[in-house]
Structure formats: structure tokens, C-alpha cells
Amino acid sequence: MRVSRALRAGLTASLAVALSTLAGAPAPAAGPANPTTAPLAAPLAASVDATAPTPAAAPRAEAAGALRVSPRVFVGGQALTFAGRLPGRGVRRVVLQRNGNRPGDSWNRVDGSGARTRRDGSFSFTHPAPAMFGISYRVVSGGTATRGVKLTARSQDLTLAVAGTSSPTRAPAGEPFRLVVDTTPTLQRRPDARGLPVFAGRDLTLQERGPGPAHAWTTVARSTVGPKGLGYFGGLRRPAGQSVFRVRQEAVTSGANAIGWYPSFPTAITVGGSARPAQAPAGR
């Protein structure tokens, strides 16, 4: 039986595609569209790589409520309250998980965290805040989890100045002077230090840098932070010349706080020269 030239060409092309598929090699370039080759090409386009990794299943997000974290403005180590609700009833254990929100990051347990829910699934507990920027926390129990809440810590900072004179870095010679510490300063180009919380009663330590190559810091006086975030060191006397001071905010470890100590930048105070009392504003 004679086979037409067009049919023979079609059969040859189909056989070439099938052999190429079995061998794992690319199929030869095809000529004009041929209905005979269409069924063979379709399965290739829809194939799935069975060796590709499957993403790990994360606990499902809590749909009946949201996680609330307070306060919203905090520093690293400050006690935060995590409050919310997980679906279902019954007392169960919950833990914190965190995610750095970088490509490839996953949720990981926060060491030392944990609490128990009430019978209705609600919870409220405290844990020290992270000192990082833009990290998310969530509460997890078994296969359920709350939504993540992004947390960004403020950076601790404090400034030191001479109180009651025309210059913050000059003190009168032969007279006692007072230094004022601001633990919630407003600093230019420092949005990470805006709105710092006041830790009234926090211990402050005034230190003076010694002479010589070691420049060891010696404790001069102690004070505490007031309700407005200020602290004072009075009755200081120094001979004419320059003295270098710094102030340490000491650690806060009461309750669930785990805030580390933090020093001010060294501040050079010139004793003598043009230091004079500050002028009071008109009308005061």
C-alpha cells in the first residue's frame, strides 16, 4: 500500500518527538503545525519537577482575633505585654515566635518565652522586647498562631550639660556647678531615638575620665531619673581647665525588664573662662 508523502512526513516528525522525549533531549525543530504532534507537546508543558522542595507548612494564622503588643514605643529589653486570643477553648501553653522579615527567614521560637491561656483561649503575658528593628513576633500554640506584629525598638541615648549657665559645656571657676542629664533628648537626624520612654527612678552614675593613657573612668556621684526624664548632679567643683564626664544609665531588671546599662558620650566641660549665669527669659 502506498503512503502519501504528507502522511509519511507527519509520522516521521511524531516519531522524532517521541524518541526525543524518552531520551531527555530537546525535540527537533518542527515544520508547519501538525495535528499529529499536538497531543505529545501538551503533557510536556504541564509537567512538574517532582524533585523541587515543598515549603514547610507553618501554623495557620489566627482568624478570630489579633495580637496586641504594648507599649508601642520601647527600648530593647523593656518588658512588653503580649495579649490576645487563640481559637478554641481550653487551657493550653503558648510560646512566642519571631521572624526577621528577610528573604528566606522563617518563624523561630523565642527562648525563655511561654505562658498559659485562659479557658476561653485568651492570654496576656510579658516578655523583654527585642533590640532589633523591623522584627515580627507572634504567639503560637500547637498548629495555631496569631498574626505577626512588627516591632522596632528605639535606641537609648542621653545627653549631659552644665545647668544654669550661658554655655552647656562651660562652668564657673571656683564655684560649685550642677550637671543635668536628659535621658529622653531630642536629637537631630535620630528618628530611632524619638519619643524615648521615661524610666523614673532609674539609677544614674556620673563618672570622670582620669589622666594618663589609660583614661580610666572614676565614679564621682550618683543620682536617679526624675518623672520628666531628667537627672541632676550638684555641688561639683573643679579647678580651672577641662574635665571630661559621662553618665551611665544603669541596667533595669525589675519585673520582666532586661534593659542593659547605657553610657552617654564623653562630654568635655571647660571650667573658668567666659562661663556666666544664663539670662532668664523676659517675663519670668
Image (cartoon, rainbow, N blue to C red):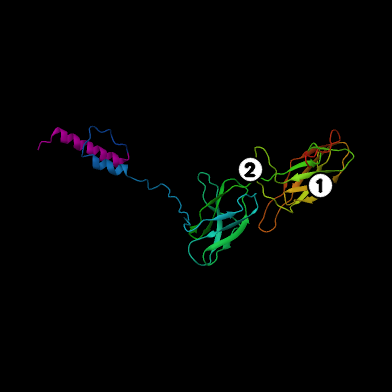
Marks 2 and 1, how far apart in space? 27 Å
> Over which residues does the magenta segment extend?
1-24
Q: Quadrant of the N terminus?
A: top left
Q: What residue would you read off at disc 2?
A: 192
Kind of residue at badge 1: Phe
Front-most of 180 and 90?
180
34 vs 50: above or below: above
Instruction: Left or right? Give the position of 30 relative to 275.
Output: left
Q: Earlier in the sequence, mark 2 or mark 1?
A: 2
Q: Position of residue 178 (x, y in %)?
A: 82, 44
Q: What residue would you read off at disc 1?
A: 233
Front-most of 282 and 72?
282
Q: Position of residue 93 (x, y in %)?
A: 55, 63
Residue at figure coordinates x 81%, y 47% from the top left: 233
Residue at figure coordinates x 16%, y 36% from the top left: 7
Reply yes or no: does residue 155 show up in magenta. no
Q: In the image, which disc is placed on residue 184?
A: none
Secondary structure at numbered mark 2: helix
